């Protein structure tokens, strides 16, 4: 009896939301693979990473152009440094809030987008010391890319991202501004 009661409520909710599932809500979820440039490798001694996120997309008021707001979590695993700081490994994680504006292209299902991001990084070191000073606080970034809408539910995108991070005291110092390409699949609800 209890099992039946526990199943009826969620089943009724699912059936009532059936018409909504057929409509495009503007929300989407994405997962992506990251390939970094030299600037990312300078921090993590590695070029790969992964990202997951959620987004909301809608049209800009009184236009046919679209905007998108994104919340994404990214992981950039480090490798052990063997040259500048032997035995040290730096890994990064990032929480990113970004906004994009879409522009149409001559190809019907392909759109160009550009945007800005606010990034909060966390660094983990192994062992606990690292010659890189990774700055705290919110760091700004830019993004640009192409979005291909494969079907009503699926789209694929390639995104170039460049963000601020901090300052390095190793390798002659300088700013740490990691850049990467992200290749994502997105499911639209």
Image (cartoon, rainbow, N blue to C red):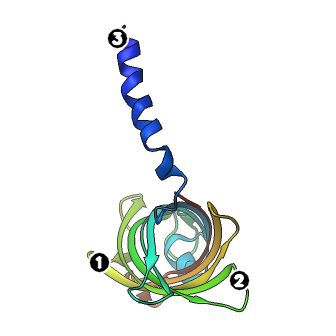
Q: Taking 34 as reference, is 137 left or right?
A: left
| Rendering coords of residue 80 (x, y %) | 55, 63
Pointer 3: what residue? 2
Residue 151 visible (yes or no): yes
How far is mark 3 from mark 1, CA to CA?
A: 49 Å
Quadrant into which the N terminus falls? top left
Can you identify the residue that label 2 sits on?
108
Residues tagged 1 and 2 counted as in contact (Cβ below 8 A): no
Residue 114 position, x and y percent, is 51, 88
Q: Taking 26 as reference, is 13 above or below it?
A: above
The quadrant holding residue 94 is bottom left
Distance from label 2 to label 3 (Cα)?
52 Å
Residue at 63% across, 73% down: 157
Who's the residue at 47% across and 36% down the image? 15
The residue most toward the top is 1
In x, y percent, where is residue 87?
51, 62
- Residue 131 at least partly seen: no
Q: Which residue is mark 1?
A: 138
């Amino acid at each position: 009896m209890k099992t039946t009661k526990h199943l009826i409520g969620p089943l009724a909710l699912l059936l009532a939301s059936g018409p909504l599932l057929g409509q495009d809500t503007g929300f989407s979820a994405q997962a992506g693979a990251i390939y970094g440039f030299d600037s990312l490798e300078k921090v993590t001694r590695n070029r790969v990473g992964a990202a997951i996120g959620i987004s909301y997309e809608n049209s800009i008021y009184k236009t046919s152009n679209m905007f998108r707001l994104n919340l994404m979590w990214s992981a950039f695993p480090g490798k052990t440094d063997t040259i500048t700081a032997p035995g040290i490994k730096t890994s990064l994680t990032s929480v990113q809030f970004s906004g994009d504006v879409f522009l149409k292209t001559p190809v019907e299902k392909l759109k160009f987008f550009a945007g800005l991001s606010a990034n909060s990084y966390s660094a983990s070191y192994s062992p606990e010391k690292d010659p890189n000073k990774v700055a705290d606080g919110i760091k700004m970034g830019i993004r640009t890319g192409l979005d291909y809408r494969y079907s009503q539910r699926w789209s694929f995108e390639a995104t170039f991202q460049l963000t601020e991070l901090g300052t390095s005291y190793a390798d002659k110092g300088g700013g740490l501004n990691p850049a990467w390409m992200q290749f994502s699949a997105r499911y639209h609800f």
